[in-house]
Image (cartoon, helix red, strand yellow):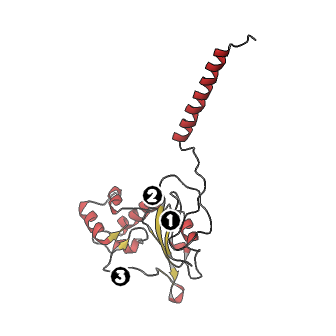
């Protein structure tokens, strides 16, 4: 094998470094860069565990209902409803977890309402909004959505399905993408829903 001159070694070394830098930049652009796990801080107190960041800014959610420590919590982007419930100390003894989608992704400003067992063992929503007040888009049931003018059972089911597929919604305007919702219905939704 012929020996390389000093200038050839320098050129090959520079090429190798350049290729490594280009490769690292390509990996980062594809989302392969991993962020270190971070303990998400709570507005109520320190967190008990850490979550891996899903990339992007943190989300702030309000966890209410049948949990041990209801409150407003900051969680990493990509966190799920189950993570928010865990951050709030977990479900309390009266929680009815079958009433919510714990696998849904959290959206910034979302309210996670954990239903609680009411009198006679029936599940009910703790601190449900009054009939004339705004309904939380993040936790509205199909029945609550049907109470809005222009929303029937089929459209209400489509809204809940779309919300679950999106992992939550941060704005009422996102419902414009649901089939069957026209401009008049959007106005009714804006008047009766809050993010």
Pointer 3 local density, CA inside 10 Å: few below 14, some 14–19, many at least 20: few
In the picture of the structure, the residue carrying the numbered disc 2 is 166
Question: In the picture shown, does residue 2 fall above or below 165?
Answer: above
Element at badge 1?
A: strand
Report x, y in % for residue 26. Answer: 54, 36
In the picture of the structure, the residue carrying the numbered disc 1 is 74
Q: CA distance from mark 2 to mark 3?
A: 27 Å
Identify the image quadrant of residue 20. top right
Question: In the picture shown, does residue 106 fall above or below 28?
Answer: below
Identify the image quadrant of residue 50. bottom right
The residue located at (31%, 68%) in the rendering is: 151
Q: Residue furthest left?
A: 184
Q: Residue furthest top?
A: 2
Q: Say which of 63 and 11 sits in front.
A: 11
Q: CA distance from mark 3 to mark 1?
A: 27 Å
Quadrant position of the N terminus in the picture: top right
Q: Say which of 47 and 5 sits in front.
A: 5
Point out the frontmost of discs 2 and 1.
1
- Horizontal side, residue 13 vs residue 174: left or right: right
Element at badge 2?
A: helix
Element at badge 3?
A: loop
Q: Residue furthest bottom?
A: 119
Report x, y in % for residue 121. Answer: 54, 86
Q: Residue furthest front?
A: 6
In the picture of the structure, the residue carrying the numbered disc 3 is 130
Point out the frontmost of discs 3 and 1.
1
Label whose residue precedes the other's in the sequence (2 or 3): 3
């Amino acid at each position: 094998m012929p020996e390389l001159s000093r200038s050839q070694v320098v050129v090959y070394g520079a090429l190798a470094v350049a290729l490594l830098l280009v490769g690292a930049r390509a990996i980062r652009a594809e989302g392969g860069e991993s962020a270190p796990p971070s303990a998400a801080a709570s507005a109520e107190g320190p967190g008990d565990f850490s979550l891996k960041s899903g990339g992007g800014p943190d989300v702030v959610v309000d966890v209410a209902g049948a949990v041990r420590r209801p409150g407003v919590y900051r969680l990493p982007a990509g966190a799920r409803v189950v993570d928010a419930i865990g951050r709030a100390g977990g479900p309390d003894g009266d929680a009815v977890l079958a009433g919510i989608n714990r696998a849904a992704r959290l959206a910034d400003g979302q309210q996670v309402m954990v239903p609680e067992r009411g009198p006679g063992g029936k599940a009910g929503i703790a601190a449900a909004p009054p009939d004339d007040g705004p309904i939380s888009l993040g936790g509205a049931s199909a029945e609550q959505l049907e109470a809005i003018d222009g929303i029937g059972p089929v459209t209400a089911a489509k809204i809940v399905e779309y919300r679950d597929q999106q992992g939550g919604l941060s704005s009422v305007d996102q419902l414009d993408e649901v089939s069957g919702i026209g401009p008049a219905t959007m106005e009714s939704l804006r008047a009766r829903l809050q993010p």
